[in-house]
Amino acid sequence: MFKLYIISIDMNIGLIGSGGREHALCQKLFESRSSKKIFCFPGNAGTADIATNIDVDILNFNKIYKLIKFHKIDIVIVGPEEPLVKGLVNFLNKKKVKVFGPNKYASKLEGSKAFMKNLCKANKIPTANFKICRSLRHVKNFLKISNFPIVVKADGLAAGKGVTICKNKKAVLNISDEIFKGKFKSSKKVVLEEFLKGEEASYFLVVDKNNFKFFGTAQDHKRVGEKDRGPNTGGMGAYSPALIINKEVEKKIIEKIVKPTLTALKKKKQPYKGILYVGLMIKNNEPYLIEYNVRMGDPECQVILPRLKTDLLSIIKNTINDNLKNIKIKWRKEKSMTIVLCSKGYPGKYKKNVRVNNLKDLKLKENSFIFHAGTKLFQNKIYSVGGRVLNITSIGNNLTKVRKDIIKIIKKINWKSGFFRKDIGWKIIN
Ligand code: AMP
Ligand code: GLY
């Protein structure tokens, strides 16, 4: 007789980041069969409930390495883009630490718009026409042959503030001049782009050296005001799946955008590994690449992960070991939505360190979740420390009802210093 032993090795996990995305990741890792202890660098008041928060600068790689050794961490998962773009994965790999995320070269897909656009051009990937400019003279030359609006982008990371849609020449020259003069330290170049019309959606993949697998779709709501008005934000809410990505569009995304990109990186001997976020504009069933991000979206992660049925840690381990083909990723059929509760004034100036009451005693139904973002625990009380403070997520078959349920929860939280968009999903909900 054979005996079957199921070996599950429990792991200590290090999770880098402090937003709603990281609380959603932390929750899934906490539920995993093979997670032992989770350490969040630095985490928030939500992760503090299920993990150990460690206050550390996430760009101080040496300090992070010391903490990994001290706490006997077996695997590191990187939430935000900045440490990836600055090479945390290369740094930890050299030290033989297992880490989930793309290396510094592959992270240029997000870290340099010029790199991404040149890769698109070389591989005939559908995207907006563009010009990379190193001086105002280059900008003026492009303006002679272009129509308005024109999208002006800082080349490097700009914490979501690097893109401006300009209606006239003066605006293009002003913002380009500011970028050349160092408005964003990471950018010496300006990318000018043709303005694409259509509907935006995000498509996610998990990628290892040999394979990739679907990792959900979502639609974010970037503008602060209802009906998509007002300035851009990090994201005011999202729902999943994104209905605009039908089977035909998905096939085009894979064939025309994803495969040529992954092949191009492999040819450079820099294969992509981790989550790939494909930001798209879709018009008449044709997808155009707007941007790549080298991580989960925030708040997209907060709607995608609650629909995931497969063990997240197992997906991550198989990706690190280039074994993705051995795993089947399963999803719940229901839809999900998240609404972000923000500090009044966001994305402009807002107050910090404001008490958030009513969370501890709140009873949530099985399919509702609160993911913390800009919160901090101090003497066992919760305070807001960011613009986006809480993500209230719910799952169900009917998004109209899901949204009503979320708004009921927000009313119970009754945070007087907060505001939120009541119309998340407005393009698909009557
Ligand atoms: P990005 O940081 O490149 O994702 O740009 C931020 C937002 O600006 C996108 O989510 C779009 O809403 C908008 N955007 C960027 N590029 C374009 C474009 N070429 N045409 C239209 N809208 C764009
Ligand atoms: N929600 C947009 C982003 O994560 O970049």
Image (spheres, rainbow, N blue to C red):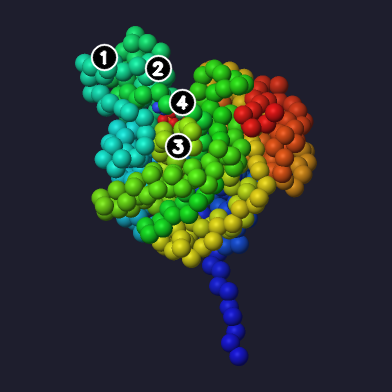
Q: Secondary structure at mark 1?
A: helix
- Work out whether mark 2 precedes mark 1 in sequence or the reverse, and give the earlier one: 1
Q: Secondary structure at mark 2?
A: loop
Q: Secondary structure at mark 3?
A: strand
Mark 4 surroundings within 10 Å by alpha-carbon count, few (fewer than 14), some (14 through 19), many (20 or more): few
- Work out whether mark 1 precedes mark 4 in sequence or the reverse, and give the earlier one: 1
In space, the residues marked 1 and 4 are separated at their CA atoms by: 21 Å
In space, the residues marked 2 and 1 are separated at their CA atoms by: 13 Å
- Work out whether mark 2 precedes mark 3 in sequence or the reverse, and give the earlier one: 2
Give the residue pinned by disc 2. Answer: 149
Could you tell me the amino acid type at mark 3? Answer: Glu
Mark 2 surroundings within 10 Å by alpha-carbon count, few (fewer than 14), some (14 through 19), many (20 or more): some
Mark 3 surroundings within 10 Å by alpha-carbon count, few (fewer than 14), some (14 through 19), many (20 or more): some
Q: Secondary structure at mark 4?
A: loop
- Determine whether label 4 and label 2 are within 8 Å by CB: no
Mark 2 close to ligand 1, CB under 8 Å: yes
Q: Does residue 57 show up?
A: no
Residue 109 is situated, as x and y percent measured from the top left of the image, at: 35, 40
Which quadrant of the figure contains the C terminus?
top right
Mark 4 close to ligand 1, CB under 8 Å: yes
Which numbered tag is attached to residue 144? 1
Give the residue pinned by disc 3. Answer: 286
- Work out whether mark 1 precedes mark 3 in sequence or the reverse, and give the earlier one: 1
Q: Residue at x 61, y 62 (%)?
A: 33
